[in-house]
Amino acid sequence: MKISTSTVRGTFDIVPADMNLREWMKNTVLGIYKQSGFEQIETPSIENLELLTKSEGGENLSLLFKILKRGEKLNLDQENLKEDDICDLGLRYDLTLPLSRFYTNNREVLPNPFKAIQTGWVWRAERPQKGRFRQFTQCDIDIMGEKSEIAEIELITTTAKALQALTFKDFTVKINDRRVLKSVILSIGFKEEDVESVCITLDKMDKIQEDGVVKELIAKGYETALSNALIEALKKVKSLDENILHDYQVEEDVLTSLKRVIEVVKTQAKGQYNIEFDVTLIRGMGYYTGQIFEIVSNEFGSSIAGGGRYDKMIGRFQKEDVPAVGFSIGFERIYSILKERNFEIPDTREKIALLFNGNEDINSVLNWANQLREEGKIVSVFPKNKKFGKQINNLIKQRFDAYGICNNGELGEITKLEEEGKEGK
């Protein structure tokens, strides 16, 4: 029986050219983040199942990859077994929850406030489709221990700089506060226990439109009049108009903080991008407690970064809450856009192939290769083929810039390869 060599649905192999682009993206973003004082950490891909399932991860909790217990712990002879009876670990579905556990576990040796960078694979049991994977990369920055809006401001401006370094220019930062939305929902007649369910439906607004939101709320058992009233209220709350928002019992300090963040970010943007209030912005995670934000590419009409404040998460692991806020760029989405653009990595280092005949002294060839490497060039060593023209064509396909031939211990002239035919250049 032939074994399939295709990747598991929702996952993908990465060939060298694509890996080069992904590494350039990651290094570019890390460089911007580190300039702003963020420090890189790493957490395990596997977490205890109890930690994952009690995280208020929203609908992502239904997408968990769970791991079976091992050895004697795995008892399949029990009656009425449930998943949690036979599973005790899971793959992380984002990087925020592992960071919160990490912070609690290492708080004594971390600075306060702590500015963290984290990149890595995450897993969700998605239905595979274009743009949705079961394994994908996230790239986050977070500030823990800072309760003032300087944290939001720094995250937004730093993420914007990273996107600009990735060649994105035309984008808009959308910002909201979960407390604004909650006040609107409660003031028109929904109950406290309804808020999260209503937010989950509102989060689909861009996909199912207003009529779809009303229909889903009615299907959940809410009154038609109440569902329609919510839509009408959201239409009124289009700006940070104090008179309108006071009617919905939004607290003054919440409005003041939102206005300050918008004002400072606009000044820092210097007209290169915009920031605007959007009361319909939800963000899917249930753990957000305050300001939330998203960056939308105006050119491609999609979100390319998102995040928010989650002041209550760390308190789940220790006796006191710690203010925390984070921002994540859409690594896979940005990668796909750059690929569609046929983006060329701005690498100025020359890539050279050194060719040699079978009777050539290998030590001499390697000495020449090392000399060129010390000059900053990328050098690979290959035996010279009899079908020299075919070999040259292969070097062009591999994106070599030039080649040299070693003969009798000497390196001949470095010859530029023809630019025509260089794929992706």
Image (cartoon, rainbow, N blue to C red):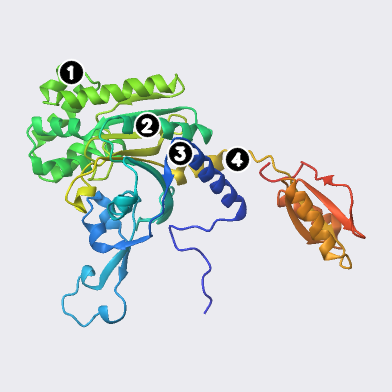
Q: Write down the quadrant of residue 409 in the picture.
A: bottom right
Q: CA distance from mark 1 to mark 3?
A: 35 Å
Whether residue 287 is situated above or below residue 370 in the rendered picture = above
Give me the disc on residue 154: 2
Of the residues under marks 1 and 2, which one precedes in the sequence? 2
Q: Judge depth for marks 1 and 2 and give the one in front.
A: 2
Report whether residue 148 is seen: yes
**Residue denoted by label 4:** 342
Which element carries disc 3, helix, strand or loop? helix
Quickly name the residue at label 1.
242
Residue at numbered disc 3: 33
* Mark sitting earlier along the chain (3/2): 3
Amino acid found under the numbered disc labelled 1: Glu
Q: Amino acid at mark 2?
A: Glu
Q: Secondary structure at mark 2?
A: helix
Q: Nearer the viewer, mark 1 or mark 3?
A: 3
**Mark 3 packing: few (<14 Cα in 10 Å), some, or many (20+)?**
many
The answer to the question of whether label 3 and label 4 lie on touching residues, with beta carbons closer than 8 A, is: no
Picture coordinates of residue 395, whole percent (x, y) = 76, 53
Whether tag 3 and tag 2 are in contact, CB under 8 A, the answer is no
Nearer the observer, disc 2 or disc 4?
2
Sequence-first tag of 2 and 4: 2
- Per the model, the C-alpha gap separating discs 3 and 2 is 10 Å
Q: Determine the CA span between mark 2 and mark 4.
A: 31 Å
Between residue 375 and residue 178, name the one nearer to us: 375
In the rendered image, which quarter contains the C terminus? top right
